[in-house]
Each structure stands twice: as C-alpha cells, then as structure tokens.
Image: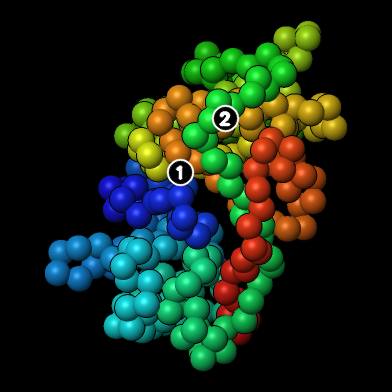
C-alpha cells in the first residue's frame, strides 16, 4: 500500500490505486493478502498486482520502471506460466497502465486487446459545487442503506452489509469515506466510497451506485460530486475512475459530475 501511494500522481495513466486494495479488504485480511502479488529487486517493490478474479489481475509498476526490460520480461513469464501462481491456464486478462514495456512484450507473445474502458479524471484545486441533494456520511449505523443500494445498483445478492463492517474494521479505512444520497422521503438512493492516496495525490471513486428504482434523476451525478468534495477535504489533488466504455450511462454520469474522459484503454487478453 505504501508503494502504491508513492506511485500515484496526477499525470500518471489510470493504474492500480491503494483504494482498489482497500475495497478488496471487505473480503477480509486473509483473502486480501492472498490476492496481492509483488515484484521486488534489492528490497524495493517495483510492481504490484491484485488478482481481481481467478482469471484477471490488475497491476501497475513503479514510475521509473515502466520501461525496465528485466522487470517486464519477468512479468511476462510470471503472468504466462500458471505454476508461478499469478494466473491459471486458459483465457485470462491483465489490466495494466499505458506505457509499460510489458504491453509490447505481451503483444510479441500473442496477447490481444480486450474490452475498451474509459478513464475519467477531475481536478480538485478549486471548490467543488453543491451536489444538489441530501448527502450523509455512511457509518456502521447506515450499513444496511449502503448494502441495499449497492445490491440494487449492481444486481448482486452478496452480503454487502457484512462487507461494510469488515472494511470499516480494516487497516485502510482511514483512507476512505462512504457517502449516501437520500431523497425527500429519506430513502437511500445512491452511495459512493472514495479513497485517498494521501495529500497531493489523486483519489479514487470505487464503487459508486444508484438504486435501480431511482435512476435517471441525477442522483449519480450528485453522489459523485459529493465524493469529489470529500476527497478535496481529505487533501486529494484530483479524483479518478475507470468504467467500461460500453457503460454509456456511467460515462455520462461522471462527465456530468465534472470528470474529463481520457483515451480509452483495454485489458490484455490471452484467449487460449
């Protein structure tokens, strides 16, 4: 986490953020530790990966090692050989920032491109506008609100209330804020969790969701603006998020909240 914090800066491409690991901590200590991979040289961490599912790894590299050939070749080997314990045999994917030598070598090995994603950024040097909705902090007492909205937003039956408690008890929760938007009847309609990487560093929106019964009313924009304001209060220099380009509504919501889209990126895919 310390290494990831150090590597974040506003001009960096979209990459693995400390908040990604912080959000993964909702599964618990053992599960999160088992999902993390690091590559080091002479006692210094040069690359960090997180196994996001059995066939997907999200990773990034130290800024001064983006074109390090020895590291890139080792990464290709470890990502390609199942016995190295990163990815299994068969169809797998790697999410990594633009500019890595790793991409060139994966292309040489026959890896293709996957679904396009749109990175979006908002600079936070100036004041953030009023979100235009009732916003409240989400603590343990509101964990059920958090769970209900996320389950509806992402169409899942996972026990997100328990996850909210687990995340709150974790060592990285001090970097996070959970917020909820409520309608005029006091019903929870949207939630967001935002993650700081420290003062002067870009923050992350992960996740943001609107209850299925309340979409199309501006609550996604409102809760995202509120999240940006919270990150600014925490000292973040900017806020970023990445969503599938096919999620047209999501991209539009972030744009409405003052985010600017950057060039699309794609996972690297090994089909066989």
* Spot occupied by residue 125 in the image (x, y as percentages of width and height): 49, 34
The correct choice, above or below, for 87 with respect to 141 in the image is below
Residue reaching furthest front? 126
Disc 1 and disc 2: Cα gap in Å?
Answer: 13 Å
Q: Which residue is mark 2?
A: 227
Of residue 48 and residue 146, the one placed in the foreground of this image is: 48
* Spot occupied by residue 5 in the image (x, y as percentages of width and height): 34, 47
Of residue 232 and residue 253, the one placed in the foreground of this image is: 232
Of residue 109 and residue 160, the one placed in the foreground of this image is: 109
Disc 1 versus disc 2: nearer the observer = 1
The secondary element bearing badge 1 is classed as strand
Kindly identify which numbered label has been placed on residue 52: none
Q: Which residue is mark 1?
A: 202
* Left or right position of 72 against 207: left
Q: Is residue 27 visible?
A: no
**Residue that appears at 63% across and 57% down:** 262
């Amino acid at each position: 986490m310390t290494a990831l914090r150090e590597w974040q800066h506003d001009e960096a491409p979209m990459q693995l953020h400390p908040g990604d690991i912080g959000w993964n901590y909702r599964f618990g200590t053992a599960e999160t530790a088992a999902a993390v991979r690091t590559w080091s040289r002479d006692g210094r961490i040069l690359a960090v990966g997180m196994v996001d599912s059995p066939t997907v790894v999200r990773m990034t590299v130290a800024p001064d090692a983006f074109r390090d050939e020895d590291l890139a070749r080792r990464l290709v080997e470890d990502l390609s050989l199942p016995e190295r314990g990163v990815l299994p045999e068969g169809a797998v994917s790697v999410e990594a920032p633009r500019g890595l030598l790793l991409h060139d070598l994966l292309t040489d090995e026959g890896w293709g491109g996957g679904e396009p994603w749109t990175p979006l950024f908002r600079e936070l040097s100036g004041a953030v506008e009023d979100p235009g909705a009732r916003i409240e902090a989400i603590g343990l007492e509101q964990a059920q609100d958090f769970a209900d909205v996320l389950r509806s937003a992402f169409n899942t039956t996972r026990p997100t209330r328990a996850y909210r408690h687990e995340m709150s008890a974790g060592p990285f929760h001090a970097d996070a804020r959970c917020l909820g938007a409520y309608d005029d009847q006091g019903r929870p309609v949207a939630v967001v969790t935002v993650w700081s990487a420290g003062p002067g560093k870009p923050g992350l929106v992960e996740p943001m969701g609107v209850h299925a019964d309340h979409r199309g009313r501006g609550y996604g924009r409102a809760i995202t603006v509120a999240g940006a304001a919270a990150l600014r209060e925490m000292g973040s220099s900017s806020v970023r998020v990445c969503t599938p380009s096919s999620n047209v509504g999501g991209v539009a919501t972030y744009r409405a909240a003052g985010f600017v889209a950057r060039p699309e990126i794609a996972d690297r895919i090994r089909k066989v």
